[in-house]
Amino acid sequence: MLTFGLDTHTLIHISTNEQKKDWFLKLNPNGRIPVLIDNTKTPPFPVMETSAELLYLLKEFDSKDIFGFKDELERNECLQWLFFWHGSGAPYQGQVVYFAKIASEKNPGALKRYKDETLRIFGVLEIRLSGKYAGEPRDYLAGNGKGKYSVADIGTWPWVSGWDFSGAITQEEMNQFPHVLKWIDRIAERPAVKSGTAKRWQNW
């Protein structure tokens, strides 16, 4: 959004359950962040679910396909990886955080289940980025050759880069995925990513 000059935002402190209040539930009945509101529409148009929001931004504000693809096959490849993470990675990694940091009762079996599956998903990303079956390593998840930074990476990176947040996944375990770690660092160096992850956001 910063790239498109869309810097309007409202910070939601989820530990206060602000996202469960009526004003927010009118925007997203599921009571989850983030929610995108397009105030250029009349009336303003809310979009929930991260992947849907990314695709909405592509259609409405990215006419040059800076973060998308004009080629239909590349576009479909991008969607495959975006949906792969949305449906497979995020739910499992979210449960790792829950059982490691939030659950009032410890459940080692559940934590192991979700951690093992998260590591398996990281392994799929490693296969993709390493080029194990394609012949050469990739810089990004989708696109021809080494790939292009796209919404597939944007939807996946915030989760994977926070692999240590739960405290349940170790550096030794992550060292199994050297191409994933390089991908994390590569994206972290992008100016817009640096701005979006600056210290002003870290207490939220």
Image (spheres, rainbow, N blue to C red):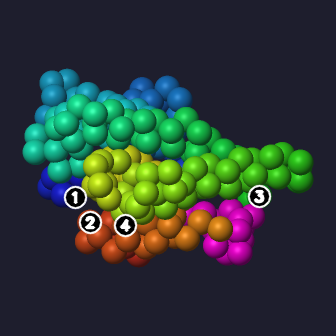
Type of the residue with mark 1:
Leu
Q: Is residue 164 magenta?
A: yes
Q: Measure how far apart labels 1 and 3 are at the Cα level.
A: 33 Å
- Marks 4 and 3 close (CB-CB < 8 Å): no
Residue under label 3: 100
Q: Sort mark 3 into few (<14), some (14-19) or many (20+) by Cα contacts within 10 Å.
A: many
Q: Position of residue 34 (x, y in %)?
A: 42, 44
Q: Position of residue 79 (x, y in %)?
A: 37, 36
Mark 1 or mark 3: whose residue is earlier in sequence: 1
Residue 102 appears in which quarter of the rendering?
bottom right
Q: Identify the mark at residue 183; answer none if there is no mark.
A: none
Q: Sort mark 1 into few (<14), some (14-19) or many (20+) by Cα contacts within 10 Å.
A: few
Evaluate whether residue 158 shows in this view. Answer: no
Q: Measure how far apart labels 2 and 3 are at the Cα level.
A: 31 Å
Q: Position of residue 111 (x, y in %)?
A: 81, 51
Q: What span is colored magenta in the figure? A: 161-175
Evaluate whether residue 80 shows in this view. Answer: yes
Q: Sort mark 4 into few (<14), some (14-19) or many (20+) by Cα contacts within 10 Å.
A: many
Q: Nearer the viewer, residue 192 or 184?
A: 184
- Marks 1 and 2 close (CB-CB < 8 Å): yes
Q: Nearer the viewer, residue 24 or 197?
A: 197
Mark 2 or mark 3: whose residue is earlier in sequence: 3
Q: Sort mark 2 into few (<14), some (14-19) or many (20+) by Cα contacts within 10 Å.
A: some
- The image shows residue 150, relative to residue 55, as above or below, that is below
- The image shows residue 101, relative to residue 55, as above or below, that is below
Mark 4 vs mark 2: in front: 4
Magenta stretch prevailing secondary structure: loop
Q: Measure how far apart labels 4 and 1 are at the Cα level.
A: 15 Å
* Residue at x 59%, y 39% (from the top left corner): 88
* Residue at x 30%, y 48% (from the top left corner): 143
Under circle 2, the secondary element is helix
Residue under label 1: 2
